Image (cartoon, rainbow, N blue to C red):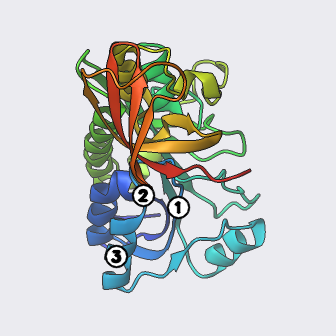
Amino acid sequence: MIFLGAIFIKIVYFGSDVFINMFTFIDSQNDILALYTYHNDEDYFNETNIVRYAHERGIPVHYEVPTFEDMSAWLDKGAELFLVAEYSSKLPVPDDARFKGINFHSSLLPEGRSYYPIECAMEMRRTYGGITAHKLFADLDRGDVIAQRRFDIKPEDDSIDVYIYCAEAALDMAHCIFDDFDAAWQNAAPQSAKLPYWRRPEAASLTLSHQMTIAQAKAIYRTYNKMTEVVIDGLRFYVDSFATGNAIIGGGDTDVVILRDDRVLYGVKDGHLRLDIQPCPIV
């Protein structure tokens, strides 16, 4: 049994900067044995701050995806909980009675099983979002629900706002869960349905074009932020930052003014986009 206050829970944590406030709270209350993280250039939030914090605290940092053998080894080293919060890979769940795992997922499960739940919700123009803490099962995002929080998505919000709302809700849930971990774990409820998986948005949905208006381009960036892409001279780039101007900069598909390697003016129907860009990885 785990009793907060009597002993620390030994935790292996998987995540990025999105939920760093929850990470630091959990670290203040428990013993984090290791941090597993990742780097993805299309993500607005990366791992910079959580890795810096882990190094300052002497927490080992891993970039490799763990195997079944790794998970079992952590159990042998005394790990009592595997906690996942915005991690890039599906974890192997060992068939071991000692295993306990929790995932903080940025949707109101069973709706929104996905690696891209926020972007998909924005693409579907949802007026609400939420976050679910659920037990880790072998089936992706199907574990018993421990806690949930719901919030509104306002017309002026973009996907980064929704990530921040999720982080605030996750921290609140973590306080409640770790206040009485045993009760939270035992009271988890099975998900009510098995709804479809939300797939990654199609490339056309998140790619800017010269045929768009400023309003259409803004809608794409509101939804996808740094996942937004643009094609210049046949090469595909992520859009790091986005602003607009009213001046028309020419006509046709060559309406691009390159200001420097990572900054361009990109012509659209009723003005131009001011973009900071970086190359997409070649796959």
Q: CA distance from mark 3 to mark 1?
A: 14 Å
- Say which quarter of the image contains residue 274: top left
Residue visible at 33% across and 67% down in the picture: 49
Placement of 31 over or under 219, stated as above or below? below
- Earlier sequence position, callout 3 versus callout 2: 2
Mark sitting on residue 138:
none
Residue named by callout 1: 39
Say whether marks 3 and 2 touch (CB < 8 Å).
no
Q: Amino acid at mark 3?
A: Arg
- Earlier sequence position, callout 1 versus callout 2: 1
Name the residue nearer the viewer: 14 or 237.
Answer: 237
- Element class at badge 1: loop
Q: Residue furthest bottom?
A: 58
Placement of 49 over or under 86, stated as above or below? below
Name the residue nearer the viewer: 68 or 39.
Answer: 39
Placement of 60 over or under 13, stated as above or below? below
Say whether marks 1 and 2 touch (CB < 8 Å).
yes
Q: CA distance from mark 1 to mark 2?
A: 6 Å
Q: CA distance from mark 3 to mark 2?
A: 12 Å
Residue named by callout 3: 52
Q: What is the x, y in percent for residue 174?
A: 32, 50
Mark sitting on residue 46:
2
Q: Residues within 10 Å of mark 3 (few under 14, many from 20)?
A: few
Residue visible at 42% across and 53% down in the picture: 262
- Say which quarter of the image contains residue 31: bottom left
Q: Amino acid at mark 2?
A: Asn
- Element class at badge 3: helix
Q: What is the x, y in percent for residue 190?
A: 58, 29
Q: Residues within 10 Å of mark 2 (few under 14, many from 20)?
A: some
